[in-house]
Image (cartoon, rainbow, N blue to C red):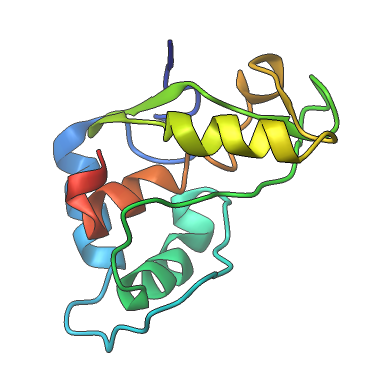
Amino acid sequence: MTRQAAVAGQFYPAGVRVLERDLRNMIPEGAKKIDARGAMAPHAGYMYSGSVAGEVYARIMPKTTYVIFSPNHTGYGVPFALSADDWETPLGEVPSDAALVKAILKKTPLVKEDRTAHLYEHSIEVQLPFLQTVSPDQG
C-alpha cells in the first residue's frame, strides 16, 4: 500500500513546482558531504525549520536506504510503530525497504507494524521531499 501525503499544503507546499523551488532554496549547493550513519533534522513546517533541515540534508552522502525515526504527535497507534508502506509526496512515491522492515519486525519485538500511527503524523512525511531531492534514486 501507499501512505498518501497527509500534510502537503500545510507543513510544506503541495504544488510540485513550488516545492522544488523551495527545496532548491533550502538545500545549499556545494556543501561538503560527510558519510554520516545518522543525523538529526527538524520536522516542523518548512517555513519554520526547512532551512535547517536543508543544511543537514545538503551534507549527507546519499545512501541506498534511510531509516527515519520520529515522535508520534497524534498518539494514534502502538507506542513503537513501523510503516511498511510506500510513502507519497508531491514529488512522487518513496518505496519502503521490505527486507529491512521484515528484519526489524523479526528482531525487535517492541516494534509493531501499524498504519494507524502514521496516518496523520507529519514528522516523517516532511523529511521525504528533502531525501527525494538529495537522493533522487530513492523516490
Residue sitting nearer the eye, 9 or 64: 64
Instruction: Reply above or below: 108 against 58.
Output: above
Question: Image check: 59 left or right of 103?
Answer: left
Q: Quadrant of residue 96?
A: top left
Q: Quadrant of residue 64?
A: bottom left
Q: Nearer the viewer, residue 95 or 107?
A: 107
Image quarter hosting the C terminus: top left
Q: Residue at x 67, y 47 (%)?
A: 70
The image position of residue 90, as x and y in percent, is 27, 29
> Measured along the vertical axis of the image, is residue 45 above or below residue 74?
below
* 71 on left or right of 128: right
Please identify the residue farthest to the top as the structure is shown.
1
* Residue in view at x 70 percent, y 32 percent: 106
Percent from the top left, x then y, of residue 48? 53, 58
What number of labels is visible? 0
- Residue 54 visible in this rendered orientation of the protein: yes
Q: Locate residue 73, reporting x and y percent.
A: 76, 36
At 69% across and 19% down in the image, what residue appears? 114
Left or right: residue 22 versus residue 105 is left
Q: Nearer the viewer, residue 137 or 120?
A: 137
- Quarter that holds the N terminus: top left
Q: Is residue 10 visible?
A: no
Residue sticking out furthest to the bottom: 32
Location of residue 29 (image quadrant): bottom left
Q: Residue 95's x, y, as percent? A: 34, 30
Q: Residue at x 33, y 45 (%)?
A: 129
Above/below status of 114 relative to 65: above
